[in-house]
Amino acid sequence: MSRIIAIMNQKGGVGKTTTTINLGHALALEGKRVALLDMDPQGQVATGVGLDNDQGLDRVLLDDHAIDDYIVPARDGLDIIPAGIQLSDFEHISTGGSTRGHKLRLAVEASSLTDYDYVLIDCPPSSGLLGINAMFAAEELIIPVSGDYLSLQGLSRMMQILKRAESISGHEIKLWLVMTRMQMRRRLTQEVRERVLKYFPSRVFSTVIRENVTLAECPSFGKTVFDYKAKSAGGEDYQSLAHDLLHGRTS
Ligand SMILES: Nc1ncnc2c1ncn2[C@@H]1O[C@H](COP(=O)(O)OP(=O)(O)OP(=O)(O)O)[C@@H](O)[C@H]1O
Ligand SMILES: [Mg+2]
């Protein structure tokens, strides 16, 4: 049984893709079998691990192709399914009624991804059809929250979307939060973390992902932090976050 987890926040630039790639690789290094699904038309999961973003979930969602035809090996224990260059077209599909939101879930259920230990879904910074599909496909949600006040504002909207998705899909979605891009010396950072802990008691992962230049450099080399510089703050933090997820460790 795989754990299917969507990495979601409609706010841009909070670290969704960075978390998908590096948490995914960290889990693979722990001996888990991991797949990364790229539901963001920006296609940065593939490029972030040094692979092409030509085809993938665009063909699955637009032309009903099988996911298994687009699984690409990325590292030992780590496979990806790219977004594909036409994925943004799916956001404008108006036919199919309410089944449109369930296309990804059905495609995952019909694929070999059910044999993986972890399936991580990188989501776009929006709450359109792609995000809805990710939410319906997932049993768990990780919301990265960056250390600024604006990221608190987006959270209440995320919660409304989550509640609606739960009532439509009829299954409970387990919620996790992770503090990202944290500048530990700033007082604001501590205040934001305290607020989030107060609103989401025991849902916030113990590990704090620090703002770390190594994490920002990796994607331009097509490398994860573990390929590039495992012994960096970023490497330490994402390894620690993987342990949080494996053991359900929260603050
Ligand atoms: N902990 C960190 N320290 C330093 N830079 C980071 C960190 N996390 C992410 N970044 C950088 O911040 C930028 C945004 O990160 P990322 O692309 O992961 O966010 P995102 O939420 O996926 O964005 P989008 O909403 O556009 O998809 C990137 O340039 C990334 O390299
Ligand atoms: Mg992203």
Image (cartoon, rainbow, N blue to C red):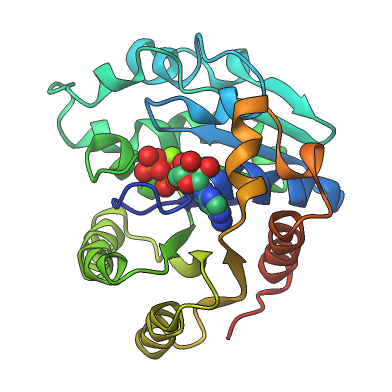
Quarter of image, ligand 2: top left
Residue at the (29%, 62%) spot, across then down: 162
The quarter of the picture where residue 92 lies is: top left
The residue at 76%/50% (across/down) is 26
Q: Is residue 27 above or below residue 53?
A: below
List the single residue furthest toward the front: 185
Q: In the rendering, at what x and y percent does residue 36 appear?
A: 60, 36
Residue 7, percent from left and from top: 47, 51
Instruction: Return the residue nearer the eye: 57 or 243.
Output: 243
Q: Is residue 5 above or below residue 38?
A: below
Residue 89 falls left or right of residue 215: left
Residue for point 66% across, 75% down: 248
Residue 111 seen in the current view: no
Residue 52: x and y, percent?
59, 13
Q: Which quadrant would the C terminus be assigned to in this image?
A: bottom right
Instruction: Judge left or right: residue 143 versus residue 29.
Output: left
Residue at image coords 75%, 35%: 78
Q: Pinpoint residue 211: horizontal percent, then vertical percent.
A: 56, 60
Q: Tell me, yes or no, if residue 169 can be seen here.
A: yes
Identify whether 46 is placed above or below 203.
above
Q: Locate residue 14 relative to residue 243 in the image: left or right.
A: left
Q: Nearer the viewer, residue 124 or 215?
A: 215
**Left or right of 231, for residue 127:** left
